Image (cartoon, rainbow, N blue to C red):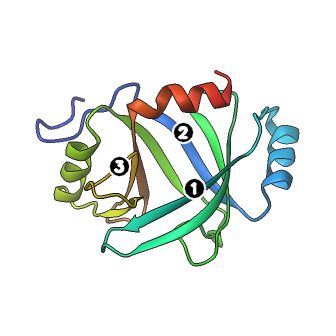
Amino acid sequence: MDPPPSGPRFPDVVSHFAVVVDDLETAMARHAELMGITWPPIRELDRSFRRGDGTAFHARLRVVYSRQGPPYLELIEAVPHSPWVMDPTGGLHHIALWSDHLVEDSARLSKAGAPLELTYDTTEAVHGFAYHREPSGGRLEIIDTALRPTIEAWIGS
């Protein structure tokens, strides 16, 4: 089924699925043992972010994507008092899609009832990526396709 005319259009649909974990190295080893997943080096991101309500905060993230994919499996080490906290059920943190038109797609998602939760803290409405919350509580991430070569080079795909 085609998306409605006003809905976002995403190339290659799914980029990755993400899970927040309490210990990145332990989770990597466990997923390697269970599913044969291999990993590139862990990436550490020291960035400023802006919540949907406009408040800014700084976080140091430790993340890794599986080499297998797409879709990839992203593991994110938990960061207290941030969107990257452990789900008590151990569930999915978000589904990520590539976006050729990040600002417009973010605005359409917000208008469709999935408000902006988080993006990088810049003067732009959204920059690099955007988390949106669905009414059911699920989280959708859209990523600027301009970042795709950098991410895929790091993953080694």
Mark toward the start of the polypeptide (1 vs 2)? 2
Disc nearest the viewer among 3 and 2: 3
In the structure shown, which secondary structural element does the residue marked by tag 1 occupy? Answer: loop
Q: Which residue is mark 3?
A: 127
Give the quarter of the figure containing the N terminus. Answer: top left
Q: Residue at x 39, y 31 (%)?
A: 145
Q: Inspect this view and state whether residue 70 appears.
A: no
Residue 110 quadrant = bottom left
Percent position (x, y) of residue 30?
Answer: 85, 48
Nearer the N terminus, badge 3 or badge 2? 2
Callout 3 crowding tier (Cα within 10 Å): few <14, some 14–19, many ≥20: some
Which numbered disc, 1 or 2, marks the residue closer to the eye? Answer: 2
Q: Earlier in the sequence, mark 1 or mark 3?
A: 1
Q: Residues within 10 Å of mark 2 (few under 14, many from 20)?
A: some
Residue topped by disc 2 = 16
- What residue is pinned by disc 1? 92
> Extreme top residue here?
157
Q: Quadrant of residue 74?
A: top right
Q: Amino acid at mark 3?
A: His
Q: Residue at the location (53% across, 69% down)?
A: 58
Asked if labels 2 and 1 touch by Cβ distance under 8 angstroms, the answer is no
- Mark 2, secondary structure of its residue: strand
* Type of the residue with mark 2: His
Marks 3 and 2, how far apart in space? 19 Å
24 vs 71: above or below: below
Residue 32 seen by the camera: yes
Q: Which callout, 1 or 3, points to the residue nearer the camera?
A: 3
